[in-house]
Amino acid sequence: MLLVDGEPVLSSAAGATSRTGATGMELVAALAGHPGLRDAADRIKAAPETRISAGQEGAPRHVYVFQREYATVDPARVELVGTDEATTCIGVVIRNNRTGMTSVSHMDFPKIVEGGLRQMLELLGDDNAPFDVHLIGGFSDASTKVVRSSGKKHVKQEGYSYPLCCKIVEVLHKSQQQFHLRTFCVLENNTATDSLGNALPVIGGFVVQTSSGVVTPASFDMNSRCPDEVVRRIRVSVSSYDPTWQGRLLETYDTQCDVFQIAPACWMPDWADIASSLNQLSDSEVLMQCSTSPAAEPPHFVENERRIWKYLINNPDWEETFPKYKPRVFHRTNDGNWSRYS
């Protein structure tokens, strides 16, 4: 059940809930208009952004989560956990207040929400513990039917963030576990407008301090989105066609050992040809064809896509990346970086 300030959401409708169901749309409307949650969203939007860089002496140990991934971390091993590059996606934080165990996911599609939330809860322990929840990301993309750039108008499909948010809050609310919603910086509470009139997310990334549970806006440099950045990005696309991952978030991080295990993924040889064709597109065409929110993407979006395509062109056989269909394993080194084990 979702609670705000210790009270169940839509408590006045509790008697009707069992008969008609508390829909995600009703929950989102109630949460978006809650004064306390709006104030909390304003505070996090006003907070300075933390820039996470890897390889610096004394840098805190962190775990980075890509789109459709999740990680549950132990505060005894990891100081920061977070994600960025979210536009229509929504970041979910669930933290056990008694132990500090913290799970973060980068949700991108309603069909992975139910199974994904179960995965996040598996290692959080004590069902009776107070669980704090933060929802950050997504924006009012449904209000923007036209993307404007360089004086031209481009029609683009709308409305990815809203159904995703509705599904997340509905599944949380139907759970027997009590979830104290602390941050609801999503949809209209996370929307700004650029000079061309395009809607944009205010916050696209965040980091959680595992010792305190404090959540702040954050961005990660390329070296801090490790290990195995490009391969993990490819897995996001591959997983859409792999029945093994249907209805599930991608697992990468081993909580008990502080190790990354990138489960094997396979792609067809013709992906190299597709990648070669896509790589011929102009930057603007890449945005329009490969993004759910072309006007809202960070500056490095196109560069990231081209790095993925170049990897597929150079590695058309997936078995070169995952010999004998074994995971790629990375151990954390003493300086906080990652070293390939297998």
Image (spheres, rainbow, N blue to C red):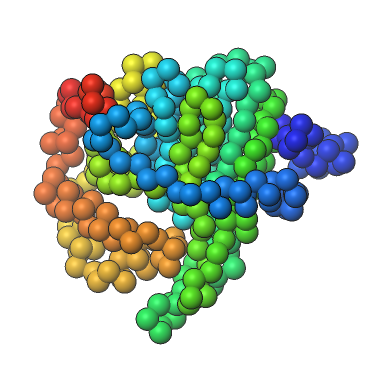
Compared to residue 142, the image places residue 247 above or below, namely above
Q: In the rendered image, is residue 24 in sight?
A: no
Residue at image coords 48%, 49%? 48
Residue with the most extreme bottom position: 151
Compared to residue 328, the image places residue 269 above or below, namely below
Q: Toward which corner of the image does residue 241 lie, by quadrant? A: top left
Q: Toward which corner of the image does residue 52 lie, by quadrant? A: top left
Residue at image coords 58%, 43%? 135
Residue 49 is left or right of residue 176, and the answer is: left
Q: Toward which corner of the image does residue 282 lie, by quadrant? A: bottom left
Residue 4 is left or right of residue 316, and the answer is: right
**Closer to the camera in the image, 239 or 228:** 228
**Closer to the camera in the image, 263 or 283:** 283
Give how far across and how far down residue 109 sits, in percent: 50, 47
- The number of callouts visible is 0
Residue at image coords 40%, 77%? 149
Q: Quadrant of the C terminus?
A: top left
Q: In the rendered image, is residue 54 in sight?
A: yes
**Closer to the camera in the image, 259 or 121:** 259
Give how far across and how far down residue 261 sits, in percent: 29, 26
Q: In which quarter of the image is the N terminus?
A: top right
Give how far across and how far down residue 222 sits, in percent: 27, 46
Residue at image coords 31%, 71%? 285
Residue 215 is left or right of residue 334, and the answer is: right
**Closer to the camera in the image, 155 or 226:** 226
